[in-house]
Image (tube, rainbow, N blue to C red):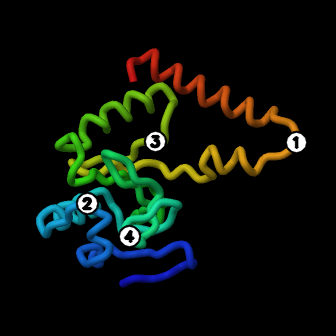
Amino acid sequence: MVESKLAAEMEVSLEDLAVKPYRDVIAYPGPDGINVRSRIDQLDKLGVERIVFTGSSSINGLSVLGKGCVGIVVKGELKDETRVALKIRRTDANRPSMISEAQLHRKANAEGVAPSLLGESTDVLSMRLVRGSTLPAWTSGLSGRNDRVVSILRQLLEQCFTLDKIGL
């Protein structure tokens, strides 16, 4: 059943993801019955109870956290009510699965970089949800001294350097 918690958030249970417009997101951009059902089954095996449509990007009028060339990122809620970020592989992605990305993600996590990888399947990565603004939104809201910006940017660049050192 669809439940609207806030104007900006819409929660949809796994069983309701098989219908439009929700199926268009979980099997973007070319949903068919087989890949929609497969992704719902994968989400279920990862412990996902519902998808929360929220964020600054959108697909067919539904808000999502992000949209890239490999995947769509949505907020999810696990059966224990933990909120997570779910990266769902696009049907037109240049790779057959998310398994290699999961391996690289675990390597980054071992160095203390990137949100914690909580689980993976062929088409879905489940990660710790990081709350906060995007970097451009955060910096545009700042006023006064730039010490905080410099500190955050230094931390980000140190993480980038760490990833570079391990070949990521």
Q: Residue at x 74, y 35 (%)?
A: 149
For disc 1, the marked residue is: 144
C-alpha span from label 2 to label 3: 27 Å
Amino acid beneath label 4? Arg
Q: Secondary structure at mark 2?
A: loop
Quadrant in which the N terminus is drawn = bottom left
Q: Are marks 2 and 3 in contact (CB under 8 Å)?
A: no
Q: Earlier in the sequence, mark 2 or mark 1?
A: 2
Q: Residue at x 51, y 30 (%)?
A: 112
Q: Earlier in the sequence, mark 4 or mark 3?
A: 4
Where is residue 53? Give x, y as percent: 45, 68
Residue 29, which numbered label?
A: 2
Q: Earlier in the sequence, mark 2 or mark 3?
A: 2
Q: Are marks 2 and 4 in contact (CB under 8 Å)?
A: no
Where is residue 116? Give x, y as percent: 46, 41
C-alpha span from label 1 to label 4: 41 Å
